[in-house]
């Protein structure tokens, strides 16, 4: 037997097809997910109801969706810069944790104090933490030619252990009954709700701002052009005078800063203290968000909402349907695969050939 | 001196899963394919292997089932990168994310169940040699299988016709295709072999190394195996050296934690990951930057007609 499926490049790719692909990929992934739920002996209809309808119809859940989309949006916007430039920062989870650690560190150091300067200082520390952490793989790649894929990923494990050390050791709440967690942050160190009785905080507005800035950078700035050129035609970008190493460093700094800011927002707005596991794998999920959004800022924003709906649905499905979170994790990986296949079918046409081996 | 054989044996046990997974990925990468899904295939192998061992009450069967599960997952990867020519980095990452979830689903009902150790294999006469004999010639059968795999991979890649074709495909898939080599078919074999070994490595973890299943138990070993392949730079002996070095670090780190030498345990746990980065740095400083990777590594292959 031989492979008789060939890829034939499409001459032109219609805009409709480009817009439709992520939706189709999502539908295919959902159908496969439904099949798995059915194989597990549960009702796929009920599962779809909990995963897709409930988060969108219940006003309380809707707010949770926006809260969940906030870190996803910030991180994935940063990752778009890396992936567009064909640089592989897969350690956003670690940069997210470092942002939370440094931002949270400021909150712990200023514990009991009040003042409008605390939150901006925390944001600065968070962004700086993520940025410096992301600089490590970038510098190792530029100076020593080491693959950024492995180093950025290894640093995720190191960040998790650092957080674990801090909340069990020097930063442990002395009044926390020996639980591995820091002191609860003072009010001045917590992002306050935007409106009375709600939970949505200013972090969401910052995320939307990041989307806006990214749109402008990619559409209007020379840097945005350089990033795209460096990813699509690295040799041509070199001839055009774009410094390859500087692009590597800058895209890593941008994505690190945004992931770090997201981490600070998560601990300040959602968790209210430092404790292990606040990362929740959001740094990895954001990679899927970036691809589902076809590496465009608007796409990343929209897919942040979609993935947030699914994550909130997953949380309630754990309770109401006893569906394990691993099902969602599996689904996310599968979604990335269908999205990538969809992208490929965008560019190529499958041709089935009958030919002798 | 009485401790030495025991310590050596634990080093071998810690190194064997890394070695097996890295050997598989080495073959895949020689064929020009970068499969970042090692961690995912490994943990699915660990969960499936453990579940199958409990259900059939046979650890040996479990080990084979784990290997096959790893291979099944690699078949998904092969379909994506060979037929759809998707980006290999992103596809491999998807495989890892998917694998972590799938393993959790498979292992759900088996958390915390212990398994008995496999009966050790003793090589007659040689295992009687004082000190080293006991460490080198007594062990589980997968340990001996891993030694055979070192030979098989080294010989297969460097001394057989298929190995030559596989390396040719990896070095330059365009030229290989022009010469009439079945690029995709050879890569399919290489990817499936990598998956088989990653699954085997995972089953080794859950059935021989720890002898229980817990979610996330591969703990980055698949990624360390990927780093070992970079470290090896195309030489199987360097891959073996690297794997045993890492086994040694793992064991030393565990002993240091037990011995309470005053360093926080998290720092010691972070050592394998930091050492991975240090090893890659060392490799670069010693002037072998980028050497040894297959020429077409990671590039999608879409032949022109």
Image (spheres, coloured by chain):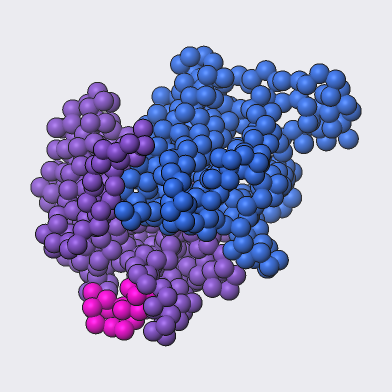
- Look at the picture and state if A320 lies above or below A206: above
x and y, in percent, of residue A39 in the image:
26, 25
Total tally of numbered discs in the picture:
0
Q: Quadrant of residue B251?
A: top right
Q: Name which residue lies at 66% across and 58% down.
A: B279
Q: Colour of chain A?
A: purple
Q: Name which residue lies at 64% across and 20% down.
A: B118
Q: Quadrant of residue B108?
A: top left
Which residues fall within the magenta stretch? A215-230
State yes or no: residue A228 in magenta. yes
Q: Colour of chain B?
A: blue
Residue B305 appears anywhere in the view: yes
Q: Say left or right for A105 vs A303.
A: right
> Where does the N terminus of chain A fall, quadrant-wise?
top left
x and y, in percent, of residue A220 in the image:
24, 82
State yes or no: residue B39 in magenta. no
> Where does the C terminus of chain A fall, quadrant-wise?
top left
Q: Main secondary structure of the magenta part?
A: helix
- Look at the picture and state if B236 lies above or below B66: below
């Amino acid at each position: 037997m031989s492979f008789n499926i060939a890829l034939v490049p499409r001459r032109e790719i219609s805009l409709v097809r480009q817009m439709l692909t992520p939706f189709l990929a999502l539908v295919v992934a959902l159908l496969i997910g439904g099949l798995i739920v059915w194989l597990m002996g549960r009702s796929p209809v009920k599962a779809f109801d909990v995963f897709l309808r409930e988060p969108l119809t219940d006003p309380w859940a809707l707010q949770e969706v926006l809260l969940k989309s906030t870190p996803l949006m910030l991180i994935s916007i940063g990752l778009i810069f890396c992936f567009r430039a064909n640089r592989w920062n897969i350690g956003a989870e670690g940069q997210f944790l470092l942002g939370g650690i440094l931002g949270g560190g400021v909150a712990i150091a200023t514990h009991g104090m009040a003042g409008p300067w605390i939150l901006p200082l925390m944001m600065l520390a968070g962004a700086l933490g993520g940025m410096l952490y992301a600089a490590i793989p970038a510098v190792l790649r530029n100076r020593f030619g080491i693959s950024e894929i492995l180093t950025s990923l290894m640093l995720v494990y190191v960040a998790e252990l650092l957080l674990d050390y801090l909340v069990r050791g020097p930063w442990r709440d002395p009044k926390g009954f020996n639980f591995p967690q820091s002191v609860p942050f003072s009010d001045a160190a917590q992002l306050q709700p935007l409106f009375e009785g709600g939970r949505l905080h200013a972090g969401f507005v910052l995320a939307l701002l990041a989307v806006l800035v990214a749109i402008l950078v990619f559409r209007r700035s020379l840097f945005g052009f350089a990033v795209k050129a460096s990813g699509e035609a690295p040799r041509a970008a070199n001839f055009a005078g774009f410094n390859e190493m500087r692009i590597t460093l800058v895209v890593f700094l941008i994505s690190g800063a945004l992931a770090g800011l997201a981490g600070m927002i998560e601990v300040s707005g959602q968790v209210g203290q430092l404790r292990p596991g606040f990362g929740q794998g959001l740094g990895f999920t954001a990679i899927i968000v970036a691809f589902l959004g076809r590496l465009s800022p608007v796409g990343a924003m929209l897919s942040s909402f979609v993935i947030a709906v699914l994550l909130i649905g997953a949380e309630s499905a754990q309770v109401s349907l006893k569906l394990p979170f691993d099902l969602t994790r599996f689904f996310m990986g599968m979604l990335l695969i269908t999205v990538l296949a969809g992208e490929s079918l965008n560019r190529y046409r499958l041709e089935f050939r009958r030919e002798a081996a | 001196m009485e401790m030495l054989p025991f310590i050596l044996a634990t080093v071998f046990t810690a190194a064997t899963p890394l070695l097996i997974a890295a050997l598989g990925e080495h073959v895949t990468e020689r064929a020009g394919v970068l499969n970042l899904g090692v961690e995912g295939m490994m943990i699915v192998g660990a969960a499936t292997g453990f579940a199958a061992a409990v259900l059939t009450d046979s650890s040996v069967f479990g080990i084979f089932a784990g290997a096959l599960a790893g291979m099944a997952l690699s078949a998904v990867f092969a379909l994506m990168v060979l037929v759809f020519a998707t980006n290999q980095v992103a596809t491999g990452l998807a495989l890892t994310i998917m694998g972590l979830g799938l393993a959790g689903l498979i292992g759900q009902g088996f958390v915390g169940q212990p398994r008995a150790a496999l009966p050790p294999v003793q090589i007659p006469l040689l295992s009687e040699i004082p000190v080293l004999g006991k460490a080198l010639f007594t062990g589980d059968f997968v340990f001996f299988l891993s030694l055979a795999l070192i030979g098989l991979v080294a010989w297969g890649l460097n001394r057989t016709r298929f190995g030559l074709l596989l390396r040719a495909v990896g070095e330059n898939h365009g030229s290989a295709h022009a010469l009439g080599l079945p690029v995709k078919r050879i890569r399919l074999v290489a990817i499936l072999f990598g998956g088989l070994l990653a699954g085997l490595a995972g089953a080794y973890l859950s059935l021989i190394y720890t002898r229980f299943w817990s979610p996330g138990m591969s703990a980055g070993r698949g990624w360390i195996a990927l780093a070992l392949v970079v470290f090896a730079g195309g030489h199987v002996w360097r891959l073996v050296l690297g794997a045993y070095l890492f086994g040694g670090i793992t064991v030393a780190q565990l002993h240091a934690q037990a011995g309470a030498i005053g360093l926080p345990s998290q720092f010691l746990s972070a050592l394998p990951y930091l050492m991975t980065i240090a090893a890659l740095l060392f490799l670069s400083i010693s002037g072998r930057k980028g050497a040894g990777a297959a020429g077409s590594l990671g590039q999608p292959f879409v032949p022109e007609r």
